Amino acid sequence: MAEEHVVYVGNKPVMNYVLAALTQFNEGASEVVIKARGKAISRAVDVAEIVRNRFMPNVTVKSINIDTEELDSEGRRVNVSTIEIALEKQAS
Amino acid sequence: MAEEHVVYVGNKPVMNYVLAALTQFNEGASEVVIKARGKAISRAVDVAEIVRNRFMPNVTVKSINIDTEELDSEGRRVNVSTIEIALEKQAS
């Protein structure tokens, strides 16, 4: 299976993740998946939108998947939403 | 064009919006679109996941679209991300 290029979005400034995605595309990746959980989901959407609107017009959204993960939080089972946004570089 | 059933997600508790979506499905809607902007995007994903995992297993995610809107904020043009999650009730 082709190596998956992933950017995990957390709580750092959004441009950190934009830069990470741009770097992976510039190093030859044709697809980069932006992944996030919980409150960072909004930032993941920002990252995808900034990458394709401001930096790489030839990148499109290939797919978006949402799901739920069960986490252990201080001994309690907690559900948290997740998102995966697959960005694909169109051959120019 | 068939009437569009929409739930706009803001800053209220997530269950407010879950209830709104369930109400529209119970009133006969076969499709409900969850819409949100900015930081409320994470909550919109929570709403979609709670509706289909906890209350309506026969509801699936039909499509997810992300985009960017330009807003006026105190005289400045600001970009904000948006999401639209279309939930569809499968004929049982």
Image (cartoon, coloured by chain):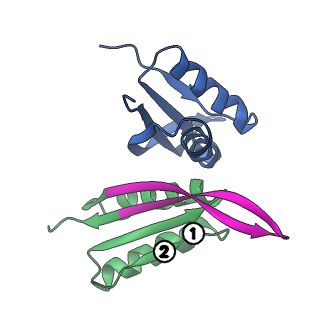
Chain colours: A green, B blue
| Between B25 and A15, the one nearer to me in the picture | B25
Q: Is residue A53 above or below residue B59?
A: below
Residue A9 location in percent, x, y? Answer: 57, 69
| Amino acid type, label 2 | Val
Residue B61 falls left or right of residue B20: left
Quick check: is B1 in the magenta stretch?
no
The kind of secondary structure element at disc 1 is loop
Disc 2 residue crowd, few under 14, some 14–19, many 20+, Cα 10 Å: many
Residue A70 location in percent, x, y? Answer: 65, 63
Residue A60 location in percent, x, y? Answer: 29, 57
Q: Residue at x 48, y 74 (%)?
A: A7
Q: Residue A56 carries which label?
A: none
Residue B88 location in percent, x, y? Answer: 41, 33
Q: Residue at x 29, y 80 (%)?
A: A29
CB contact under 8 Å: marks 1 and 2? yes
Is residue B17 visible in the rendered image? The answer is yes
Quick check: is A63 in the magenta stretch?
yes
Question: Magenta segment range?
Answer: A62-86
The kind of secondary structure element at disc 2 is strand
Label count reads: 2
Marks 1 and 2: same chain? yes
Quarter holding the N terminus of chain A is bottom left
In the picture of the structure, the residue carrying the numbered disc 2 is A7
In the picture of the structure, the residue carrying the numbered disc 1 is A9
Q: Main secondary structure of the magenta part?
A: strand
| Between B48 and B68, the one nearer to me in the picture | B48
Quarter holding the C terminus of chain A is bottom left
